[in-house]
């Protein structure tokens, strides 16, 4: 599996998302088993958040990484309403307890909130000094937010910005992605297969899939990963999906493939508001 450097660690370009996990105790064992299989397949970058299942997702992750914490790069996110001087250490402690670990590799602000960024960054830095987190970063930040952050984060400590990115939603290509590339900051692409919606039935995606003897979801992942500095974090509970996702990193799209996909979703020619789900 292709790798890149994220938060001072070498990580696979495909990780595992966990939104919607930990919401139903009847599905919990399948979710744990899926994350374990993903780790075996080399998808040992796991993305979670205190928001997912209101902590349930972090509990599932904790079960899946038990006994193999050091094999996994763990990303979690703090709610903006907890991103204060006092709120961040408390939220982090709760996340650590749910995941039964003593450190988070990468801790993100889930989206811009109302606490001053200086305060949030200061609290992240304290956690880093105390060894509770390895690095910190942000999510759902547009260019203007990144510029504000950059004005405060003079040491460029921010390790990533996690944003929505897939063939249907490529607005970030206009300005955010180039900005991050210049800053040498990896982009974590969420919903990289469009939450298995219409994207997977698009005729261009279907045709490219046929050319590569691959599935539409694999083509969407290969498309997201066609440039350097991007990490995709698909969520999959179905073991068949997990195996397909792990294999998708091997697919290399041709210029013709990309042009065909452009006919459905052209590259942005002007600034668009950052898309979020
Ligand atoms: N920072 C943020 O604000 C933010 C927002 C949204 C998401 N995220 C993160 O990004 C992760 C991914 O986004 P997402 O979960 O919303 O959407 P996604 O990964 O694009 O899609 C997940 C859906 O795709 C299905 N799937 C997975 N692999 C497949 C395959 N090979 N073929 C067909 N279907 C497949 C899954 O089914 P099964 O589960 O049944 O396998 C699930 O229904 C989240 O889980 C979360 O960790 C972050």
Image: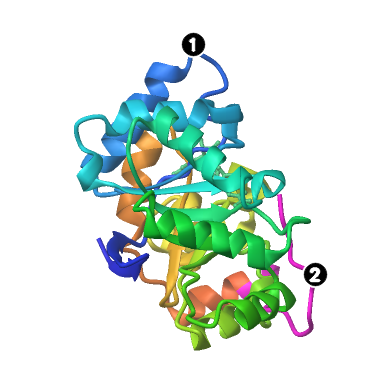
Q: Which mark is residue 26?
A: 1
Few, some or many residues within 10 Å of mark 1 (<14, 14–19, 20+): few
Q: Which mark is residue 273?
A: 2
Does dot 1 land on a helix, a strand or a loop?
Answer: loop
Q: Position of residue 230 (x, y in %)?
A: 45, 69
Above or below, comparing residue 173 to residue 237 in the picture = below
Count of marks placed on residues: 2
Q: Is mark 1 within 8 Å of ligand 1?
A: no
Above or below, comparing residue 250 to residue 46 in the picture = below
Q: Dividing the picture into quarters, in which one does residue 212 lie?
A: bottom left
Q: CA distance from mark 1 to mark 2?
A: 38 Å
Q: Earlier in the sequence, mark 1 or mark 2?
A: 1
Magenta stretch, overall SS: loop
Residue drawn at the location 49% of the way across and 38% of the way down = 18
Range covered by the magenta-colored residues = 262-277
Q: Is residue 88 visible?
A: yes
- Verify whether residue 273 appears in magenta: yes
- Verify whether residue 9 appears in magenta: no
Q: Position of residue 167 (x, y in %)?
A: 61, 64
In front of the other: 29 or 62? 62
Does dot 2 land on a helix, a strand or a loop?
Answer: loop
Q: Dividing the picture into quarters, in which one does residue 145 lie?
A: bottom right
Residue drawn at the location 49% of the way across and 11% of the way down = 26
Pick the quarter of the image with the N terminus.
bottom left
Few, some or many residues within 10 Å of mark 2 (<14, 14–19, 20+): few
Q: Position of residue 91 (x, y in %)?
A: 55, 39
In front of the other: 70 or 168? 70
Q: Position of residue 117 (x, y in %)?
A: 68, 65
Left or right of 97? Residue 143 is right
In front of the other: 36 or 147? 147
């Amino acid at each position: 599996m292709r790798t890149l450097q994220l938060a001072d660690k070498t990580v696979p370009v495909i990780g595992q998302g966990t939104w919607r996990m930990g919401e139903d105790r009847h599905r919990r064992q399948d979710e744990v088993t899926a994350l374990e299989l993903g780790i075996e397949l080399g998808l040992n970058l796991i993305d979670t958040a205190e928001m997912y299942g209101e902590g349930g997702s972090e509990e599932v992750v904790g079960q899946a990484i038990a006994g193999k914490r050091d094999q996994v790069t763990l990303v979690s996110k703090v709610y903006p309403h907890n991103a204060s001087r006092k709120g961040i250490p408390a939220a982090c402690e709760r996340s650590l307890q749910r995941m039964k670990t003593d450190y988070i590799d990468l801790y993100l602000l889930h989206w811009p909130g109302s606490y001053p960024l200086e305060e949030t960054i200061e609290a992240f830095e304290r956690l880093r000094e105390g060894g509770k987190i390895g690095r910190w970063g942000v999510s759902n930040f547009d260019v203007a937010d990144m510029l504000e952050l950059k004005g405060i984060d003079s040491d460029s400590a921010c390790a990533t910005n996690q944003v929505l990115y897939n063939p249907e939603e490529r607005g970030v290509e206009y300005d955010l992605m180039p900005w991050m590339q210049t800053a040498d900051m990896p982009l974590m692409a969420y919903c990289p297969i469009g939450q298995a919606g219409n994207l997977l039935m698009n005729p261009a995606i279907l045709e490219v899939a046929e050319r590569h003897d691959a599935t539409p979801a694999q083509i969407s992942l290969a498309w997201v990963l066609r440039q350097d500095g991007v990490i995709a974090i698909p969520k999959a509970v179905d073991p068949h999906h997990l195996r397909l996702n792990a294999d998708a990193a091997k697919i290399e799209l041709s210029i013709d493939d990309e042009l065909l996909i452009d006919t459905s979703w052209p590259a942005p020619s002007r600034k668009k508001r950052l898309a979020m789900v």
